Amino acid sequence: MAEVTVLTDDLIRQLINVGEVDLLVGLPTHNNAETVGGVVQAIQAGILKSFPRERTAILNVDAGSKDGTADVVMASSINDLRRAYNTHALRTLPSITTRYAGSPSSETALHTVLAASDLLRAKACVVISPESVNIEPGWVDALLRPVYRDRIDFVAPIYRRPKFEGMLVSNVVYPLMRALYGQKIREPYPADFGFSAQFGNEFLAQHSWHDETGQFGTELEMVLSAIAGGRRISQTFLGTKSRSEQHPDLVAAMRQTVGVLFASMEVKSPDWTNPQVATVLPTNGPEYEVTLEPVRVNKKRLSQMFSSGVSELAPVLQSILAPPTLDALRQIAALDGDALRYPAELWAKTVYEFAASHHKSVMSRDHIVQALVPLYRGRALTFLMENRSASAEEVEANIEALCHEFERLKPYLVDLWNGGK
Amino acid sequence: MREIIMAELSQAMQEMLRSAAHLLPRLIVMLIIAIIGWVVAYVLKWILRSILVLVKFDKVSENAGASQFLSHAALPTPTELVSRFVFWVAWLGFILLGVNFLGIGGLQQHVSKFFLFLPRMFVALFIIFFGMLLASFFSRAALLAAVNKNWGSPRLLSIAIRTITVIFVFSMVFEELGLAQETMLLAFGIAFGAAMLGFAIAFGIGGQDLARQFLERRFMQEKGNEKEEEPSPL
Amino acid sequence: MPARQDSLWYKSAVIYQVHVRAFYDSNGDGIGDFQGLAQKLDYLKDLGIDAIWLMPFFPSPLRDDGYDISDYRSVHPSYGTLEDFKKFLTAAHERQIRVIVEMVLNHTSDQHPWFQESRGSRNNPKRDWYVWSDTDTRYKGARIIFLDTEMSNWAWDPISKSYYWHRFFSHQPDLNYDNPIVREEMWSVMRFWLDLGVDGFRLDAVPYLVEREGTSCENLPETHAIIKDLRKKLDKDYPERLLLAEANQWPADLRPYFGDGDEFHMAFHFPLMPRMFMALKLEDRKPITEILQQTPEIPPSCQWALFLRNHDELTLEMVTDIERDYMYDSYALDKTMRINLGIRRRLAPLLDSDRRRIELMNGMLMSLPGTPIIYYGDEIGMGDNVKLGDRNGVRTPMQWSGGWNGGFSAADPESLYAPLLLNPVYGFQAVNVLSQKRIEHSLLSWTQNIVRARRSTPVFGSGSIEFLYPANYRVLAYVRELQNETILVVNNLSSSAQAVELDLSKHKGRIPIEMFGKNLFPRIGNTPYLLTMGPYQFFWFRLRRI
C-alpha cells in the first residue's frame, strides 16, 4: 500500500470525501497564482469534453505558496456548492489541495500524487505543470487517452519549442538515454505526462523516496523505471511549451538530469550495456515541432565560461577525463570565440568519460556532475553556431547525427565502465 | 688505610654485583618484551596494511591530496606510511613497557606520559586526515561553484578555502596535542589574520569583478538579466 | 366527506396513482372496474395513503389509454357505470381517502361528438370549438411532443378539408380555448364531477391550452388567465378541492402555474425525477441539489408533487444532451426501452430490483419537499413488459396473489386487457400483494412503514428545507424544519460504504433520534458530526432538544 508520510491528516480527510476516482490530475505548484487558474480551467474543459462520465479529481500539491495559489485551485472546484451551473458537467469534479513543508521538491509532489492515486484507486493519472499557460483542453485527452483506453503505461509529451530551448535535453539527456536504453524519448524530463495506475503503484513501491530535502529529477527516474520495467511507453504531441518563469539554473538542471542518469546507470537493470537499436515509440501527432524564433544568447559569455572552465578546472578534469580528451578540449578552448567548435564525437566521449568517472567515484560524484557544466556550455555554443540559420528539419537532423555518435561510441563507454582508464 | 679502602671497595663491588644481579633479570625481561613487541608490531603492521589495501586507502588519500604531497616529498604511499608508523608506535610502546618494568623511578613517569600521549596523537592524526579530505572537498566545491557562476578568480577562491581549512585543521591538531598551546593560538591568530588580510587585499584588487558581481547579485536581484541570456536548458 | 376539514390537506398527503382498468376486475371481463377498485380500498387504507389519483376513465376509443375522451360526463362501460363510480367515491370518503380524477382539458378524442360536429362543415356551430386552419404552416414555433409517432402538429381532415391542430396524437384534436363557449363548457364538465364529490382534478397537458403565432405555444399568458379564472370559480364554490397541474417544464417555467397562490395548488416537479435516477447512477448528489437550487420559491399554500415513476415514460426532456445520453446508457441500453425522449420502464426494473436502491429512492421521495405520489404496483416492486407497445408496458394488471391471473381477474388469461407478467423475477407468482403481506420485511411492509413515518410529522409536507453540503459529494443531506420540529435526512447515494462529516453546528446540543428504530445517536457537539453509512443507506433523524 501507499507510503503514509506524505499524506497529512487534512489530505486524507479530503481524499475520503473524494472517494474512488477513475482519473486523477496532479498539479504541483509553488507560487503560481497567476497562471494556475487558466491551467485548471483548461484541464476541466478537457475532462468535461473527453471524459465527461469518468469520476475525476484534481489534486494540487503545493509547496507552501504565499500568493494564494491553493485558494485559486480550490475555488475552481466544480460542485454543487458553487451555484455556478456548469451545464457541461455531468458530475462533481472536485479540486483538492495539500501543502507540504520544506522547500519546493518535485519528488515530494510526485510522491504525494502517487500515494493519493493509490488510495483513490485511480485508473490513470496525469501530471500537469502549472506553468503550462499554453495548455489546451486537448492536452488532457492526449495524455490520458493512451493510458485509459489503449493500456499504455507512460505517456511522454512532445512540444513545439524554439530550436534553442532545451539544449541540455537535446544534447545530453536525449542522446545519452537513447544510446543507453534504445528508446527515442524526445522529452525524457517531462513537465506534463500521463501514466497508468499500475505503473504508478509499482514506482511508488519501488522507488526510495527522500521527502526531507528538496529533490528534483524524479520524473526522469520515473521514465527510467518505465524503461527498466519493460513498460509500454508512448509519446503524444501536445502543443507549444510555455516558457517557464522559474527554470532552474544550469548546475541544478545538470544535477537533476545528468546526475540522475549517471546514478541510474549503476543499477544494472535494464542492462544498458547491450548494444541497442533505437526504437521509435508509438507517437500521437508529429514527432517534433520546432519554431524558429530567435533567442537572445550571449555567445561571448558562453565561450568565455567554457574556456575559463577548461583551464580553471584542470586539476579536476585531469582526474575525470582521459588525457587525449583533455588535450583536445584544451585546444578547442584556446580557439577564439567564433571558431570554437566542440564536435559531436568529442562531446560523446566527454560525456562517456564523465559517466565512467562517476561510476568509479574518482571524487565526490556531485562534483563530477558540476564539472560537466562548463564543458556543456561549450557544446551548447557549438550547437548554437551550427544551427544558427538551420531549418527545423536540419536541427532535428543534427540532433539525430549527435545521437548516432553516442550510439556509435557506446562500446567505448562499456569499455571504460568495466575496465580501467 | 689500604685495608679499609679494599674493604670498602669490595663492599661496593659486592653491592654493585648485588644490584646488577637484581637488575640483570629485569634487563633480560625487558629485552624479551622488546622482542615480543617487535613481533606484535610487525603483525599489527601487516594486518593494518591488508585492511588499508582492502579499503583502498590510497585512493581515499588521493582525494585528500595526500598522495600528491607524499610523492612530491619522495615518501612512500599512504598505506605504507600508516602501516610503518603504526609499527614503530607499537614497538616503541612495548619497549617503553619494558623500560617501565626496569623499575627505574623517574623513567616510569615519562613512560606513562608517553602512553597518555598516544591517544591524543591518534586523534590528531585522525583530525589531520579528515581535515585534509575536507579541505580538498571544500576547495574543489568552491572551484566548481566559482567556475559555474562565472565569478572571477576561481583558483584563488579555491586555494583560499583550502588554506583556511588547512590552517584551521592544524590549529585544532596542535590544540589537541597540547603542544605549545598559547604559542599556537597566537600563531594561528596571526596566520589566519594575515591570510584573511592577504586575501582581502587580493580580493579587493584582483577580485573586484567578483566582488561587484557578488554584491549586485545579493542586493540588486538582477537575476533576470543573466537568465535571459541563456535559453532554458530543459 | 372526509372528516378532516383541512384546506391544505394536500400538503401532508401521500397520493396513490392508479388506473381503474389495471387494479381489480370484479365482473370477470378481464378489465378492472370501479366495483373492483372499491373492494380494494381497504388495501389502500392499510398502505396509509390519503388520496387516489385516478387515470382517465371517461368513455374513450382508448387509442391513448383514455386520454382521448369521447364523453366527459360518463364512465367507460368497461369500468362500470356512473353509479358504480359514485359508490366507489362514497366508500373512499368513508375511509378518509380523497379522490382526484383526471381532467383532460386540452384535447378530446376525434370520436367525441363535439369533434364529429365540428368537422362536419365549416359552418357548424361547434366549428370554432377546435383549432382549424387551411394550411399546416401556422404556429411553427411549437415542438412535436410524440416524436416517435407524429410528424406534425397539424392533421388533415378529409371531411372538412382543412387542418386541425393537435399537440398530441393526431386522433386527439386540441380544443380551442380562445372560444369562451369552450371554456364555459369545460367548467361545466368540471362542476359535474365536483358536484358528485370528487376532491380534485389533475389537469392534463395544461401548457398547451392556447396557441399564438410566433411563440412556442406553451405556457402563454392567456393560458394562465384561463387557469386563474378556473381557480377563482373553484375556490368560490368548492373550497378544499385540488387543482394539480401536469406541465413538463423547467422549474422556472413551472413557477407561473402557481401564480400568487391563485392558480394551481400543486404541480409536478418533472425535472427533479430523472435527476434522482441520474444521481443514483453517478453516485453524486450534484444533479439533485442543483435542480433544487434552481427551483424557485412557491406560494405557501402551494405544493410540488413528487414522483419516481408514473404511467408515462421516464421523461428525459428536461435534461441536457450529455445527461440524456448518460441516462440512456445507464438505464436503457436496449433501445426498445426508449420512447419519445424517455425510458418506458417501471421503478423496480430500472433499479435492477435492488431492494436497497428502491428503499433509498422512496426515502428521498418521502422526505424531499413536496407531496409524494406512489404509482400503483411500485409498492410491491412490480416489473414491466417492454414488449407491449407505447407505454403499456408499465400499465400491466396489479398482482394480488400467486394464483389465477395473479388475483386480478377471474376471466380467462387471454381476455385480460393486457397480459400479466410471467417471468420468474417479476411475474405475479414472484411479486404479489398476498405473499408480501405475509412477510414482515417485504417491500410492501416497508412501504407501509415509511408512509407511516412520513405521516407522523407535518415537517415533510410543509417544512422548509436547507441543504447541507458535506464535502463527500456522494451523500445528500438536508434539514427539514417546521416551527419547533427539525428533521435531518442523510442519504448515501453510493453503492459502497461512506463516511461523511456534517456541519450541524446550527443544531448544536440536540440529540438525533433515528426515526424508524427510535434509537438515540450521539449528541451534536462542536465538531463536525461523523456518520458512517452502508451502501445506499439513508437516515431520518429527529433532532430533539431536551
Image (tube, rainbow, N blue to C red):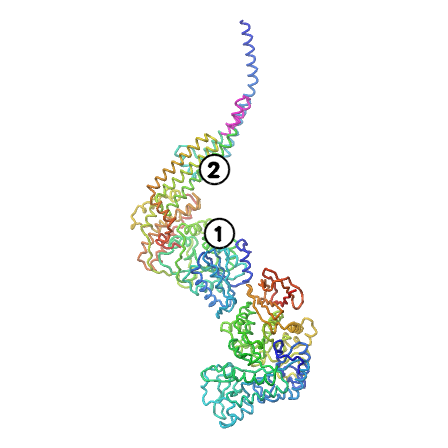
Q: Chain of mark 1?
A: A
On the image, the x and y values in percent for residue C380 come to: 64, 75
Q: How many marks?
A: 2
Neighbourhood count class around disc 2 (C-alpha, 10 Å): few under 14, some 14–19, many 20 upward? some
In space, the residues marked 2 and 1 are separated at their CA atoms by 42 Å
Neighbourhood count class around disc 1 (C-alpha, 10 Å): few under 14, some 14–19, many 20 upward? few
Observer able to see residue B211: yes
Front residue of A142 and A402: A142
In the rendered image, the residue lying farthest to the top is B1
Front residue of A187 and B145: B145
In the rendered image, the residue lying farthest to the right is C438
Q: Chain of mark 2?
A: B
Label 1, on which residue?
A102
On the image, the x and y values in percent for residue A270 come to: 47, 53
| A208 lies above or below C434 | above
User: What is the span of residues highlighted in magenta in the rendered image?
Assistant: B89-114
On the image, the x and y values in percent for residue B212 come to: 35, 46
Q: Residue B91 colored magenta? A: yes
Q: Secondary structure at mark 1?
A: loop
Callout 1, which amino acid? Gly
On the image, the x and y values in percent for residue C202 come to: 58, 82
Hey, which quadrant is residue A186 in on the image?
Answer: bottom left
| C389 lies above or below A135 | below
Callout 2, which amino acid? Val
Q: Residue at image x 46%, y 36%?
A: B129
Label 2, on which residue?
B53
Q: Residue A287 colored magenta? A: no
| C190 lies above or below A56 | below
